[in-house]
Image (spheres, rainbow, N blue to C red):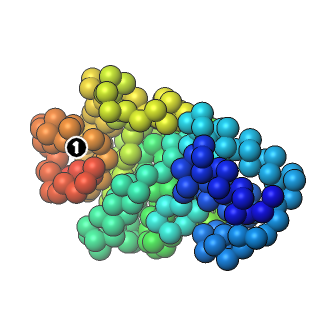
Amino acid sequence: MNVDSWLKKARTRISALDAELLLLFVLQERDRIFLMTHLEMRLADADVLLLDKLIEMREQGMPLAYISGEKEFYGRVFQVNQHVLIPRPDSETIIDIAKRLDPRIFLGKVLDVGTGSGVLAITLSLEMPMARVSASDIERDALFVASKNAISLGARVDFLESNLLKRFPKDEKFDLIVANLPYVDIGWPWRSKELEWEPGSALYAGDGGTEIIKKFMTEAVGRTRYVILECDPCQHKTMIKFSKNLGFVHIETRGFQLVFSYKV
């Protein structure tokens, strides 16, 4: 079976894009143009068997990132598995905001709370090589993934197993804390079915999805100049009011992100 024949067969079961990405993964190629210029290339029988198995996994709803074990974020490829959330393009906005927020951050202390695969901490470290970047997560398996990503991408990040800020000294202060914590309400009717494959502990929270981010903001009082927080737009009004009562000043809303300052 050649590339063209396999793609035609696969497109009857999954989307054309998914079929192309699965084929590129198995062939260890990254450019979709490769497929268009190699339509007559014969596939090895072992590759066809593997591809058919991957189609079954995709039909069952497994995200492509978990099938391939990687996901691109801010122009870099990160390893992911089912111990960590799949990085979303929306979260790249956190990096954009951080880079223009305050020049002191480039030489300051930055913390990523709930780091997961490490995409935020690692990207911030690589984009701000003079900053001292730390990252925490409550899940040891997630920190293992993040550490591997930091090593493979050459980023200097200090990782710590911690429930939010609990294991950080209370007198330690940061120039910026970024946080993409669980904020999904399990009752939301618009939840994607693919979320069922991702770790629930990194997705869901009580109190309409705000329970954990409220705890985080409470712990962050007096410990950082800025916070960039990700949550659903339907939660923004609640979180702005809650954070204002803690002494934070809301300075920007951009996409899913809320930006706060605090005088320390």
Q: Position of residue 232 (x, y in %)?
A: 27, 41
Q: Is residue 201 left or right of residue 225?
A: right
Q: Give the x, y percent position of residue 45.
A: 87, 53
Q: Which residue carries the number 1 mark?
A: 233
Secondary element type, mark 1: helix
Q: Nearer the viewer, residue 171 or 35?
A: 35
In the picture as drawn, the residue positioned furthest to the bottom comes out as: 37
The quarter of the displayed image where residue 19 is located: bottom right
Identify the residue at horizontal 19%, vertical 42% (top origin): 236
Is residue 14 or residue 139 the one in the foreground? Answer: 14
Residue occupying image coordinates x 39% and y 60%: 92
Q: Is residue 260 visible?
A: yes
Q: Residue at x 55, y 55 (%)?
A: 16
**190 versus 175 height, above or below:** above
- Amino acid at dot 1: Pro
Neighbour tally class for label 1: few under 14, some 14-19, many 20 plus, Cα within 10 Å: some
Residue 147 x %, y %: 63, 52
Q: Quadrant of the C terminus?
A: bottom left
